[in-house]
Amino acid sequence: MLTPTTLRKAVLLSLYGSSALAFAPAAMAQSAGEAATSQAMQSINVVGSRRATSSATDTVAPIDVIPMNKAAEQGGNFDLSQTLTNISPSFNSTRQSGADGADLIDSAALRGLGSDQTLVLVNGKRRHTTALVNLFGARNRGNTGTDMNSIPLLAIKDVQVLRDGAAAQYGSDAIAGVMDIGLKKSLGCEAVAGFSQYSAGDGKNYLTSAYCGLAIGNKGVIGITGEYLDRGRSNRAEAGNPRIIGDTESKNKTLYLNGELPTSATGKLYFTAGAQTRDASSGAFARAGVGSDDIPRRNSAAMYPNGYVPFINGDISDQYGIVGHRSQLGEWNADVSQTYGYNKMRYNISNTMNASIANQDLLAGGKGISPSRFDAGGFSFQQLTSNVDINRFYSDILSGLNIAFGAEYRSEEYKIFAGEAGSYIDADGVNFGGAPGSQGFPGFQPADRVNAKRHSSAAYFDVEADLTAAVKVQGAVRYENFSDFGSTVTGKLAGSVRVADGVLLRGSASTGFRAPSLQQIYFSSTFTDFVSGVATDVVLAPNGGAIANAAGLPKLKEEKSTSFTLGGTWTPSQAISVTADLYNIKIKDRIVLSGRFNADNYPALGARLAALGVDQAQFFVNSVDTKTQGLDLTASHKTNFGANKLTTFLALNVGKTEVTGIHAPASLKGYEDVLLSEKERLYIEQGGPRSKATLGFDYVTGALETDLKIIHFGPQTLGTFSGSAAGVPNQHYEGKTSADLSFTYAINKNTKFTFGGSNIFNAKPSAQNVDETDNGFKYESVQFGLNGASYFGRLWVKF
């Protein structure tokens, strides 16, 4: 029976975090059903808990439960990253422009930390990261991350966000928190068709997506989702500027399967398989034409007399699969699974040239012609994870005791593929005028090729105890050993106390770690960056290679963290709920991408680099300590006006990251300002806004639903190329407020039509000096992006 106390807990679940609040009507309906189901079947799984009888109301750490049905049926954003950005204040994903490969994949992060410090799961199993390392011009600089846009919205049941350190429970990367994407496997079919574009008339998006859940075998089910998303290019460059500043062009084709099949009265085979191909294209910096210094250095008068914009095209393939079996062994629950993940990106550079080839042709009496398209190579990352998880709940010990233990084995492989020779060669020689390699993105060279592997093994023990009906505690310890840098032990202790019927206090303390990614250890490339509008060739040297060894750099090791949370929830009635959680996260030996070392800023090292044929070099180094602290606050109220319903919610995140120490390797002592310049420090401290708040109103009257969200993005400060020490002020972006508004009309119970807009007041970031921004535009891709207002329509049909 659903008692008033149970109902209050169900409401609390729906309001546990800012994300759940954003879809409050759907969240409350789902949570109440989940609470009832957990009592009847005792099989609810919640991220952060290995207790088979757990529901999210029983957890001792803050958890956001985000039902995705409304976003998939009525939302104005067509991908997962942008959808969550406009819902959850603790979540941030910046759509880049002018950042090479980072333009093609949106990296996601929690609480202002790096994208590789957030662990992403799918159906409770670790998801692989991308093969891409975010480099210059990108938020999450030097990080790898998870491409959440490779999963279609219509395939997702909910997203659970554990806003707490959880490395002791899940292993590497779970420093800022854990996101678990739960996929659908319900019976029935539905489809969505959507269109959107910016108010400027460009950036047209076309979406078609369909889901169908079918019964298979004896009480089994399989959910199949297919999606095609065509995202058009946008451009905010000023009139007369050949640059293209805005969204990349992207065509995504995605197919996902998710299901289960009973094998016995207590056994169940489960499986997930997904694949996406993405053809994406981003505009690089423009090269000038006749009369400019770019000829013959980076252009040919015979090919592009009026200048040109190279296009960085990425052919991206992403694959993911899970197969596992859950069963009962007496009183114990056992889960054995195998997970596979693969991500590959191959660069094809078009509307480009190799200026050294064109100059060689010119010197030989030709017109000065080069090929205009090159295969520039690329990279891939593969991850295989094997898990054995066992748990048992003792209802007769204390007020309930759950014991869990398990083991994990993970193998990883990272490859870099060389491009065709024309994408990197210097055809006319170093003493002549043409720059080598394909303009926009020089190809990977044979010396950059990598085929690196490693493996890790782990064991954990986890206990959750209800000391009384009002007091709960949780403890976890995990041992993990990596083949390339050694072992680490992490632990966690958390607890909650219900001090009154509507008041819960909770807190946690944990240690964590993040292993250096293979991408950070082995990435190698010679590329062209633009510094104050001037093209500069830079070598990014792999750890352990000749250049890094010449610089005296040690091997990369794990980052280590300590995390503390303290908060509570207040639910004075079924209609009102408030939650507040303070957090403090300290990270030691954080891996950063260094500044560029050369003969000007470090003469001795510059001489050693010159002996290796290198002018400028940068590296990944364990050199920075940081402290991140902040507050997550939510409040919600639900009321009825006769047959009409109004849900109001407020969700706020205020956070601050500070670099508390720089520990340069012995060989770089005294050059901390090069290792981590002010510009690089601000990437770490303010890669995302330091505050974000969402105020939402959802009003339903009859067949019409009106949804209004007002989203405030706090101020943000980024560095400049010249630096404040040279008298050039940093880029300061004032706080800005955006608003999303939509109207949904239910034609019948199986058909809905939604139209509306995002950022309807056309808010844009504060203007800056174009010579000091990374993308060469008057503002970076910060806060809510740089495109302005957009409008959309979406039709949902269930059949």
Image (cartoon, grey):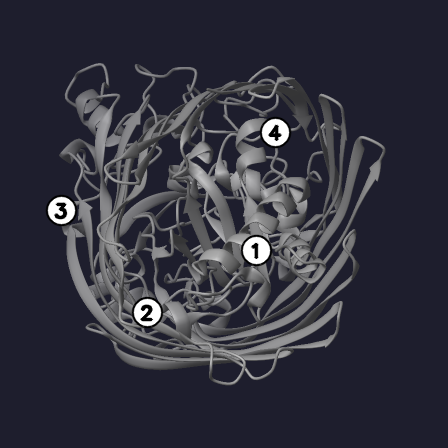
Whole-angstrom CA distance, mark 3 to mark 2, is: 25 Å
Under mark 3, the amino acid is Pro
Identify residue for label 1: 35
- The correct choice, above or below, for 517 with respect to 158 in the image is below
Give me the disc on residue 446. 3
x 15%, y 34%: residue: 420
297 horizontally vs 623: left or right: left
User: Eyeballing the image, is 14 above or below 763?
Assistant: below
Callouts 1 and 3 close, C-beta under 8 Å: no
Q: Position of residue 279 (x, y in %)?
A: 33, 27
Q: Secondary structure at mark 3?
A: helix
Labels 3, 4: front one: 4
Residue 714 appears left or right of 290: right
Quick check: 246 left or right of 507? Answer: left
Q: Element at badge 1?
A: helix
- Label 2 or label 4, whichever comes before in sequence order: 2
Q: Which residue is mark 2?
A: 605
Q: Which residue is mark 4?
A: 787
